[in-house]
Image (tube, rainbow, N blue to C red):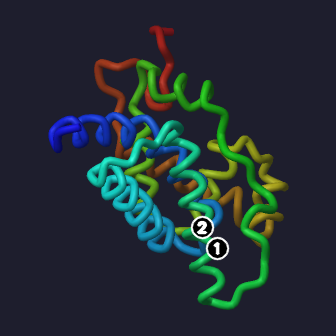
């Protein structure tokens, strides 16, 4: 396979799997920076293997396994004995596709605004909206009071509404038709 073909195939794999792998890492890692570092190394390793001519039949499974290994190595180096596989499940692919294909603002635009907020708020949104956790369960998973989770979530929603203005599209968070 030529380098251009490898690049095109890698880009296709990257676009299809990025959100899925990133959501897993952001919930399991102790910080957003750690998740992004591991994510970068996971995709770099895939690209290097593809350039070397290795054929990877299930790239999504390969990337998930690499992400788990990256987390394990990270926590092992920090000597954290907690299991990284307890707790949060990954978002359903159908739900993710429907969110990405909605007429409202894209998932990436909202995620970018949330990345600019503090890390706790970012995790609250991922658990509550991305993984459909209740406020009570979100608070328990993050070790916070329910009132803290509610206030951070409502403040962030208010900020999002200001930052992402309603335009010709029907509204933030995607109504697919006019009311």
> Considering only vertical position in the picture, is 33 above or below 18?
below
Picture quarter with the N terminus: top left
121 with respect to 145 (left or right): left
Residue placed at 50% from the left, 66% from the top?
A: 35
> Considering only vertical position in the picture, is 39 above or below 21?
below
132 with respect to 43 (left or right): right
- Give the residue pinned by disc 2: 69
Report x, y in % for residue 31. 54, 73
Report x, y in % for residue 179. 50, 9
- Give the residue pinned by disc 1: 72
Report x, y in % for residue 131. 69, 44
Tally the marks. Answer: 2
Q: Is mark 1 on a helix, strand or loop?
A: helix
**Mark 2 near mark 1, Cβ–Cβ under 8 Å?**
yes
Tell me which corner region of the image, top left, top right, bottom left or bottom right, holds residue 129: top right
Residue placed at 22% from the left, 42% from the top?
A: 7
Residue placed at 71% from the left, 85% from the top?
A: 80
């Amino acid at each position: 396979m030529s380098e251009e073909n490898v690049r095109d195939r890698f880009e296709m794999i990257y676009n299809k799997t990025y959100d899925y792998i990133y959501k897993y890492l952001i919930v399991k890692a102790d910080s957003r920076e750690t998740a992004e570092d591991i994510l970068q190394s996971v995709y770099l390793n895939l690209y290097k293997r593809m350039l070397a001519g290795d054929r990877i039949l299930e790239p999504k499974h390969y990337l998930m396994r690499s992400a788990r290994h990256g987390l394990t190595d990270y926590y092992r180096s920090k000597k954290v004995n907690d299991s990284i596989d307890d707790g949060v499940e990954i978002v359903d692919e159908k739900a993710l596709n429907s969110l990405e294909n909605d007429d409202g603002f894209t998932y990436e635009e909202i995620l970018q605004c949330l990345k600019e907020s503090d890390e706790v708020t970012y995790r609250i949104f991922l658990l509550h909206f991305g993984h459909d956790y209740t406020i009570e369960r979100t608070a328990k998973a993050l070790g916070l009071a329910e009132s803290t989770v509610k206030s951070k979530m409502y403040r962030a929603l208010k900020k999002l509404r200001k930052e992402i203005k309603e335009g010709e599209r029907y509204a933030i968070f995607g109504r697919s038709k006019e009311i």
